[in-house]
Amino acid sequence: MATPRKTKKQVLFAQGNEAVVEGALLAGCTFFAGYPITPSSEIMEEMARRLPRSETGVFIQMEDEIASMGAIIGASLAGRKVMTATSGPGFSLMQEHLGYACMTEVPLVIVNVMRGGPSTGLPTSPAQGDVQQARWGTHGDHPIIVLSAASVQECLEMTVTAFNFAEKYRSPVILLLDEITAHTREKIELPLPGEHEIFNRVVPSMPPEWYKPFEDTMRGVPSMPPLGSGYRYHVTGLTHDVMGFPTQQPDEIKALIERLFRKIDQFYTDIMLVDEYLTTDAEVGVVAYGSVARSAELAVAQAREAGVNAGLLKLKTLFPFPRPFVERLARSCKTLIVPEMNMGQMSREVKRVAASLTHIRTLNRIDGQIITPSQILKAITQG
Amino acid sequence: MIPDCQLARFEIRLSGTGGQGIITLGRILGYGLAIGHGYYVSQTQSYGPEARGGASRADLVVSSEPISYPKTETVDLLVALSQEACYKYYRFIKPHGALLIDTTLVTQPPSNIYLGLPFTTLAAEKIKVPQAMNAVVLGAVCYYLPFAQRAVMRKALEESLPAKIAKLNVKAFNLGYTEAEKHFGPSPDAWCPRPAESVLE
């Protein structure tokens, strides 16, 4: 008789960066190419340790971030689940290939651990200055998915989510962390196998000669065979037709770009992830993301003790911007406070959707320090 | 193991100079309290871009409840292993807090109420390895924290280090613990609030 398996979860005391690696491996990542940069280096170090030990894992240190992106795009086209990790300066170098991945619909995950900028800036200090770059950094009109995480456990979960979204929507997904989230050590539980749903890209079911690589479907996401599996097709960054060859025809261009947007747009409810904390009766709302959301959580709890009905909307998906949640909170609150470690990148979005509904107050800090709970508490209580 | 103390954000700051092993100390202390004792622990760090020198700091929040803000604003225990760090962070100690200094390196304590041991001298003379200084500090901190147990913390130390240096560090840990036993008084009662009766059921 079989004895029931002991299903005790493994508990680790790990950094956010290490949790990203656990999440990636759980999601089935088998290829990592990158170039080390503080404060993201631990992701690369851990991948270098872990991937070669797994059965099919490949780890490559590339000559720079441009090549890193090239390598993971190639590996993804060949059927791998892929990831790279970097920080601000490296993320700037990745922008060109990021656009290529958007246009060719290559699933991949980029982790950007934000540090102080611009340029080399503050390598060891936190910031949230790459938010709009993640949305609009690469040229051309494109949709993209940008996620964030606030705690170590969330780093693991959001990495799994990032891979799932990448595979489901055939799109690059950017996971924006900051130095604090990446370097904080906390106790985390590793999920049991099967606890998280893992998505894999849809592969074509028709014979190779019938396959149209960029054909529109109901979901707007074409099926994707691994290169070398008998399905021959053309991949180009030029605007292409359903067969993947360059086109100048307005109707084909329009169909392609509209599909790229539609495949993300029509699944907003699936993609927009937020956490709400005491928002049901909130009069003062805080909208925050990343490590600042944790300062905000403590500030909201302290404000409640002081008799102010405060609430927190923590954004886990940054783009597509979770508009319905922000609007709903804006309608019930007399003030929305948007604390962030930049000069106001997410507050632009909040103002865009909620300026007519409520008073919006920004709280910015750009000196390489986290926004403290007492700063946010002051903003809440002073209105 | 069920912790005896019902902690609500007990905050510790370990500070000194880059290269002293401050962040390693924070990592091992955090590991011991989180995995060994079962508390919620959040350990953050702050350091400069230099490989050696420059200010280095590790902050720990220990709690019986999940932790929201992972950093510290004011601290219950400040461990200062350099004069500069001592001056810089002294004012962040809470009313019932304590200051623990390395009396070899901090020659001008900002107050005459402090706990001190010559950690650097102890490591260099008794252990003969100056790099083991942080393990001596860990021993002393472990003695002074009412919710940390010697055996559990020693095990955490062993598990966190490569086998070839584990034995030496355990020796340094024991030295720190016994020295603290000799020189430190009991820790403040406020550091270990007992759980309410109803919570026990």
Image: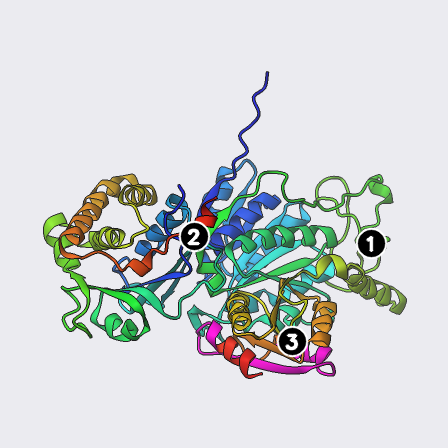
Of residues B19 and A383, the one nearer the viewer is A383
Residue at mark 1 to residue at mark 3: CA–CA distance: 39 Å
Tell me the number on the disc at residue A283.
3
What percent of the width, then of the height, locates residue A23?
A: 56, 48
Taking A163 as reference, is A286 above or below it? below
Q: Amino acid at mark 1?
A: Arg
Whether residue A351 appears in magenta in the rendering, the answer is: yes
What percent of the width, then of the height, locates residue A17?
A: 48, 55
Q: Which residue is mark 1?
A: A219
SS for callout 2 = loop
Q: Residue furthest toward the top?
A: A1
Taking A294 as reference, is B127 above or below it? above
The region drawn magenta spans A347-374
SS for callout 1 = loop
SS for callout 3 = loop
Same chain? Circles 1 and 3: yes
Q: Residues within 10 Å of mark 1 (few under 14, many from 20)?
A: some
Residue at horizontal 70 percent and vertical 61 percent from the top? A272
Q: Amino acid at mark 3?
A: Glu
Badge 3 vs badge 2, beta-carbon distance below 8 Å: no
Whether residue A261 appears in magenta in the rendering, the answer is: no
Q: Residue furthest toward the right?
A: A251
Whether residue A24 is visible here, answered yes or no, is yes
Of residues A77 and A177, the one nearer the viewer is A177
Return the chain for callout 3.
A
Is B6 placed left or right of A267 in the picture? left
Compare marks 1 and 3 and give the one earlier in the sequence. 1
Q: Residues within 10 Å of mark 3 (few under 14, many from 20)?
A: many
